[in-house]
Image (cartoon, rainbow, N blue to C red):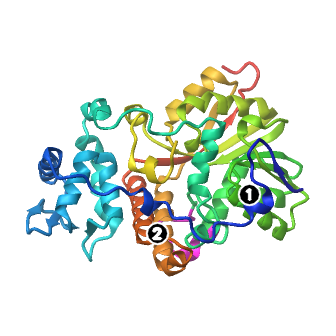
Amino acid sequence: MSTTIDGPGQESLAAAQESLATGENTAARSLPPAPAYGLRARVAKQVLARILRNVPVTARLSTGEVYGGGEVTLEVTDPTAFFARLGQSPMIGIGESYMAGEWRPSADTDLADALAPFAERLNELIRPVFYRMRHVVLPRGLNPENSRHGARKNIEAHYDLSNEMFAQFLDPTMSYSSALFASLVPAPTQDELEQAQLRKVDAILDAAGVTAGSRVLEIGTGWGTLAIRAAQRGARVTTITISTEQAALAQQRVDAAGVSDRVEIALRDYRDQTGQFDAVVSVEMIEAVGEKYWPTYFRSIDGLLAPGGKVAIQAILLEHHRMVATRDTYTWIHKYIFPGGLLPSQTAIEQVLAEHTTLGVSDVAPLGQHYAHTLRLWRERFLANWPTVRDLGFDGTFRRMWEFYLAYCEAGFRTGYLEVAQITMERPAPGAR
């Protein structure tokens, strides 16, 4: 089978295969200068000093001032800019300040180790009143909506950066989602990552009951590993994506694996998919759907699932109260990494299923600590391969942006602020309550 292109405005596959090898670098262009130091900056400085009384972190300012007394140490090399950014927007300023090189962990401190104490205490540090007042600092509507056009632009902003760049930190499967390691003790190594990613894919396929002859729909192609693995089981796979860069490389990998007769790669929005499938699978794609479109997403899956079929998705999750408190908050992650993104809770997924579909959750398999180690290994690879990434056209601002993103997420999973799970869904048996 070949790649199918649906919808207006799609690039041709030939154009898509001309990857962004020059590394179109938007990070430096979009990073604003620090605002002027004023009242908000002075307040931010006072707030940080108070926070560090209860967080085991030390902040050493280049002016000689020291706050806190923990073993983990941060060095603030430009306090004026650092506090000005924090005062303007705490949810964005900390990341922008790292991108600008205005603070860093000390030489003996890992960046994720520096961020973990804050993630572990986020509920204590950020009171509910802050979220109620956040629109005083940031207006609503900054996070783009995931309409058909909006979703395509949001996905392009991240996944179409450069296939070559992603290849510098992902394993040979090009899997950009949590791996599933055989054991977390001792800590997994780089040599284990590829097999752990295949183990994750196999677990999803097993949960969805994929066997020889299964008709499989994958929502969110990635770079093709799940589709290849399903086809190698003898399944017939339709895999859909709205990333032209991913589709191009996925097609090459499907062809190289010798399964192109059993895999169709379609440049298609999930809302436009038709047909009936024995299994619907999706790995870490729901995070890009948006709360407004969750009912549409799950209704689409429900309508595409054949009688007796199963759904298996891998989803990054927040606890429900955290999701409710933060769902209208515009953060550094939205601005620089995943525009339009929103993490669901398991409760929210179950509510949407109950209200809009005939599906119900039949199994949940958490693997949050596996993601913490996956992110650690990715960051190690990214930094080790930085010279190659730089040669693709990316600069030091991009390096610090990506390093902060990977460490920030690692800290979230390590401390339990974030979770990820493989969730199986199916229709209850007739007569079941």
Q: Which mark is residue 247?
A: 1
**CA distance for labels 1 and 2:** 25 Å
Which residue does the image show at 52% across and 42% down from the upper left? Answer: 340
* Kind of residue sitting beneath label 2: Arg
Q: Which mark is residue 11?
A: none
Q: Quadrant of residue 126?
A: top left
- Give the labeled residue for mark 2: 379
Which residue does the image show at 45% across and 64% down from the upper left? Answer: 402
Which residue does the image show at 30% across and 67% down from the upper left? Answer: 101
Q: Quadrant of residue 197?
A: bottom right
* Whole-percent x, y for residue 176 in the image: 59, 60
Q: Answer yes or no: do the residues labelled 1 and 2 have beta carbons within 8 Å?
A: no
* Quarter of the figure with the N terminus: bottom right
Residue 316 visible in this rendered orientation of the protein = yes
Q: Which residues are magenta?
A: 181-195
Q: Is residue 338 left or right of residue 289?
A: left
* Quarter of the figure with the C terminus: top right
Q: Secondary structure at mark 1?
A: helix
Q: Secondary structure at mark 2?
A: helix
Q: Quadrant of residue 262?
A: bottom right
Q: Residues within 10 Å of mark 2 (few under 14, many from 20)?
A: many
